[in-house]
Amino acid sequence: MFSSSLKTSCIAFFLCCIIVQLAMGQAEKKTISNFGDWRIDQVDVNKSYMLIGSGEVKGDLHRFLGFRYFWIQCFEGFDKLSITIPYDKKPEFKTTQPAMPVSVWSDRAKPRELLFLMMNPAILIVMSGREGEIGWAAKEFIEVLLTAEKTFALGFEEKSLHFDMSDFKAAWSKFSQVCTR
């Protein structure tokens, strides 16, 4: 009845809608594990798990409006991850592509500039498994995150978030376990 690309697009749209709800605090989730500044939440509505990192803001604090975290989300039945950064305002795009450069770096990796899609005025998102630059960005983000020993940071628009990595390896291990169930 429906082409596979249409089905894939519909599923992706559904997942993005749930991600937007999560960013806005509207989807119900429960914490299943805590690891210092890292926690794992289970989201029943879309059968997903979120690894959430809480960081310290550096830069233009008044424009950050309390968002001091990002999350990586895995979905049951899919081999893809999404990486989401809450965002506090509608950006001014210089091109027709609604994307924003985000830099990531760690104590063990040089800064890399990645392109995140703007899903709405509330979040920046990148998903693994997609072809082209966006899929590449998710891979690069995870690579920098996994190389970090003491600190990981991400930055955009003259502000940055810095994350303590002392409990990350344990959090990542548990997240990997729940994502492969």
Image (cartoon, rainbow, N blue to C red):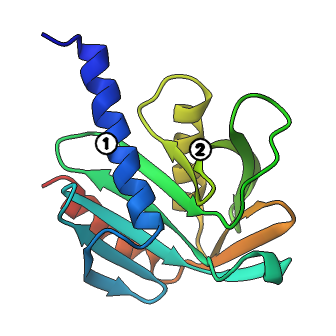
Crowd around label 2: few <14 · some 14–19 · many ≥20 (10 Å): some
Quick check: 39 left or right of 91?
left
- Observer-side mark, 2 or 1, equals 1
Quick check: 155 left or right of 163?
right
Residue 4 location (% of width, % of height): 24, 15
Instruction: Reply above or below: 65 against 137.
Output: below
Residue at image coords 59%, 66%:
148
- Between 23 and 80, the residue placed more toward the observer is 23
Quick check: 76 left or right of 147?
left
Q: Earlier in the sequence, mark 2 or mark 1?
A: 1
- Kindly identify the amino acid type of the residue bearing the numbered disc 2: Glu
Residue 169 location (% of width, % of height): 42, 72
- Between 32 and 26, the residue placed more toward the observer is 26
Give me the C-alpha separation between circle 2 and circle 1: 25 Å
Name the element at disc 1: helix
Q: Quadrant of residue 55?
A: bottom right
Marking on residue 14: 1
Instruction: Reply above or below: 155 against 131.
Output: below
Residue at image coords 17%, 42%:
77
Marking on residue 114: none
Quadrant placement of the C terminus: bottom left
Residue at image coords 38%, 68%:
51
**Label 2, on which residue?**
140
- Kindly identify the amino acid type of the residue bearing the numbered disc 1: Phe
- Between 77 and 95, the residue placed more toward the observer is 95
Residue at image coords 27%, 63%:
49
Instruction: Reply above or below: 59 against 118.
Output: below
Residue 59 location (% of width, % of height): 85, 77
Q: Quadrant of residue 12?
A: top left
Name the element at disc 2: helix
